[in-house]
Every structure is written in C-alpha cells, then in structure tokens.
Amino acid sequence: MTINDLAPDERIALGGLLRLVIRSDGDFTEAEEETVNQLGEEHLGGAAAMWRVISDSAQACPRDADIRACAAKVTRPAARTVILDFMRKVAAGDEVSAEEETLIGWLESLWG
C-alpha cells in the first residue's frame, strides 16, 4: 500500500499526525521540512501535494484532540503501516526527540 491507496479519512489522519510530529518538540527544523518535501516528491509527485495533505488535515482536524480521534478511526493494517512509516521518517529527519518518540509510541499502542 502507498499513500495514494489511503482513503480520504486515512489521509486526513496522516496529515494530522505529521503535524503532531512536526510540532511535538516545538522546533520545526529544515531537516524535517526537507523530509516532508522528499516524501511528497517520492510518493505524490511533488512536495506541494504532501503539504496539501497536511493542510487539508488542518481544516478537517484543527485541534490535537481531533487528530487523535481521527487516528483512532484508522482500522486497516496496511494504512496504519503507511502512516507510521511516514511519521517515523519525518521524526528521523533530524534527531528523534523524546516527544516524537512518545507520540509514535502512543500511536503504536493505540493501534496495537
């Protein structure tokens, strides 16, 4: 499965969770931005498309609680794998912070 195979609600969850990862340590680094751009180039044909996924999620899920509720509704194992993979890649764009690890750990437990 790829990002193109995600259902609209799964894309919203992906975008929102990426927003949480980016904001989790309070520092949006150039390395994280470049990772998001690279993922967009590799998987969506351009960085702008990835930023659109993230932007669309902000409209659908403006609060952190909304993002977490949306993530809880993702049930397909393949979609969960794609989303976690993207989150890990963005977190690893620079040094993975404790806050990023906590967020990813929460999601892994949720989807257990």
Image: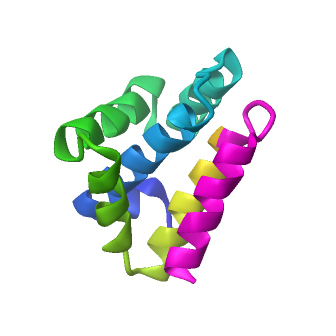
Q: Residue at x 51, y 78 (%)?
A: 111
Which residue is farthest left? 60
Residue 53 percent coordinates (x, y): 33, 39
Judged by its main secondary structure, the magenta piece is: helix
Q: Can you give x and y, in whole percent of width and height, for residue 46 in the image?
A: 46, 28
Q: Is residue 73 visible?
A: yes
Q: Kindly tell me whether residue 85 is visible in this rendering.
A: no
Residue at far right of view = 95
Left or right placement of residue 51 versus residue 101 in this view: left
- Residue 69 is situated, as x and y percent measured from the top left of the image, at 30, 64
Say above or below: 108 vs 29: below
> Measuring 66% from the left and 45% from the top, which residue is drawn there?
99
Depth check: 2 or 72 in front? 72
User: How are the colours assigned in the image?
Assistant: rainbow
- Tell me the quadrant of the picture where the C terminus can be found: bottom right
- Let me know if residue 24 is in the magenta part: no
In-front residue for pair 38/21? 21
- Residue 55 appears at what percent x and percent y? 29, 32
Q: Is residue 96 left or right of residue 87?
A: right
Which quadrant of the structure image shows residue 103?
bottom right
Left or right: residue 103 versus residue 91 is: left
Task: Verify whether residue 111 appears in magenta.
Answer: yes
As displayed, is residue 70 above or below residue 24? below
Q: How many marks?
A: 0
The residue located at (59%, 50%) in the rendering is: 87
Q: Is residue 27 above or below residue 75?
A: above
- Give the residues in magenta: 91-112
Identify which residue is drawn at 55% across, 34% down.
22
3 and 22: which is toward the camera = 22
